[in-house]
Amino acid sequence: VQMCSQELESDARYYKAYIDYTYNRYEEAMPALQTLATHSKYGHQVPYYIADIQLQQKNYAEAKQTALKYLNEHSKDEYTNEMTRIAGEAAYGQAEGDAKAAWKVWQSGADYRHEKSIPLPSQGTCSVWL
């Protein structure tokens, strides 16, 4: 992808990578996503797609590392729960089905999840992990 505008080139690269990701064409999506990992506009969301691809390809150590790095740098945002899930699933796969290992990683992710109070009909409020 080459265009006259650097911004448009990055946009096109991101959307092409996203389409490849949604169609499970991970080998095509990954190089483009990796080039966008430090991009000011897309660098925040790209690590999720990279970690998920690594998990789908059973690269458990890499998926766990990518997810935990993200959680340490961007705690409590819209990708926190998914990155915690990826870290836990990767730990489970890495430990060859050892649920205790996965639970330990997932529990450590509880520090990253954020809590919201939601109103319940006729019962006051309730705290929910998101």
Image: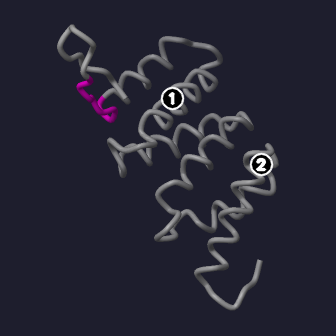
**Quadrant of residue 126 in the image?**
top left
Q: Is residue 64 left or right of residue 23?
A: left
Whether the magenta-drawn stretch holds residue 80 is answered as no
The residue furthest bottom is: 4
**Relative image position of residue 35 (x, y in whole percent):** 63, 68
Residue in the image at 33% along x and 44% along y: 75
* Colour setup of the view: one colour
The residue furthest left is: 124
In this picture, is 62 found above or below 125? Answer: below
Q: Which residue is mark 2?
A: 26
**Relative image position of residue 124 (x, y in whole percent):** 17, 13
Magenta part of the chain: 111-118
Whether the magenta-drawn stretch holds residue 116 is answered as yes
Q: Pointer 1: residues within 10 angstroms few (<14), some, or many (20+)?
A: some
**Relative image position of residue 100 (x, y in whole percent):** 48, 12
Q: Which residue is mark 1?
A: 85
In this picture, is 126 found above or below 31? Answer: above
Q: Amino acid at mark 2?
A: Tyr
Which of 19 and 112 lies nearest the eye of the viewer? Answer: 19
Task: State the CA–CA distance, disc 1 to disc 2.
Answer: 19 Å
Whichever of callouts 1 and 2 sits on the residue coming sooner in the sequence is 2
Residue in the image at 74% along x and 38% along y: 57
Residue in the image at 59% along x and 66% along y: 36
Q: Is residue 31 left or right of residue 63?
A: right
Q: Secondary structure at mark 2?
A: helix
Q: Secondary structure at mark 1?
A: helix
Q: Quadrant of the C terminus?
A: top left
Q: Is residue 127 left or right of residue 79?
A: left
Residue in the image at 26% along x and 29% along y: 116
Q: Amino acid at mark 1?
A: Arg
